[in-house]
Image: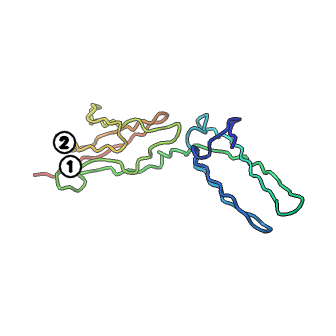
Amino acid sequence: MVQNNIEVDQEATSINFFTARAYEEVTATFSWVPDCAVLTEANKPSFTEVYFAVEDDKCFNAKGDTIRQVIAVYDRPLRLNSYEPANAFTPNGDDIGDYFYLPTLPSGNCFNRFERIAIFNRWGRSVFTSDDINFRWYAKGMPAGVYYYIIYYTGQIYKNEVYVHLEDK
């Protein structure tokens, strides 16, 4: 396959095309899961040309045709404005909701990847940071109250708050 005037290795780019043989109508399956290497600019599609060849060699005068298909590849959108994470937890040692984490946090896309999370107390002092998207904040020694966090992506930030609830003893 040729992409952007460069010969592309089908196995390295997750392209699958299965040859089909049939009488009359012929159908075949084509699948491709492109990686970030095919994109050249953020928020703009990359165009890839794919050629399919059809040959009929069952007759004495073999016939063939080639079909050119242009495929537009877009980066997966990062929809943080509709992201609604949990907003409270209870670090009381009962093994239920003892830490703050965001299991459904989008990892990002080709041009907008997760970088880190920073959590701040109500006075703006940093109390936790992590560059691991699977972070867990246990809030050990922190008082109950509202904490604010910022999730940094390479091209975007997401701000929200979380409430630490501690039972009165």
Specify which label sits upstream in the sequence, 2 or 1. Answer: 1
At x 66%, y 59%, the residue is 29
For disc 1, the marked residue is 91
Q: Is residue 112 above or below residue 64?
A: above
Residue at the extreme bottom = 23
Q: Are marks 2 and 1 in contact (CB under 8 Å)?
A: yes
As shown in the figure, which amino acid type bears the numbered disc 1? Pro
Looking at the image, residue 76 sits to the left or right of residue 117; the answer is: right
Front-lying residue, 169 or 43: 43
State the mark number for residue 108. none
For disc 2, the marked residue is 140
Residue at the extreme right = 61
Looking at the image, residue 145 sits to the left or right of residue 43; the answer is: left
Q: Is residue 86 above or below residue 131?
A: below
State the image coordinates of residue 152 (x, y, percent, origin top left): 41, 35
As shown in the figure, which amino acid type bears the numbered disc 2? Lys
- Secondary structure type for disc 2: loop
The quarter in which the N terminus is drawn is top right
State the image coordinates of residue 134 (x, y, percent, origin top left): 34, 45
At x 50%, y 46%, the residue is 79
Tell me the quarter of the picture where residue 151 sits: top left
State the image coordinates of residue 56 (x, y, percent, origin top left): 82, 60
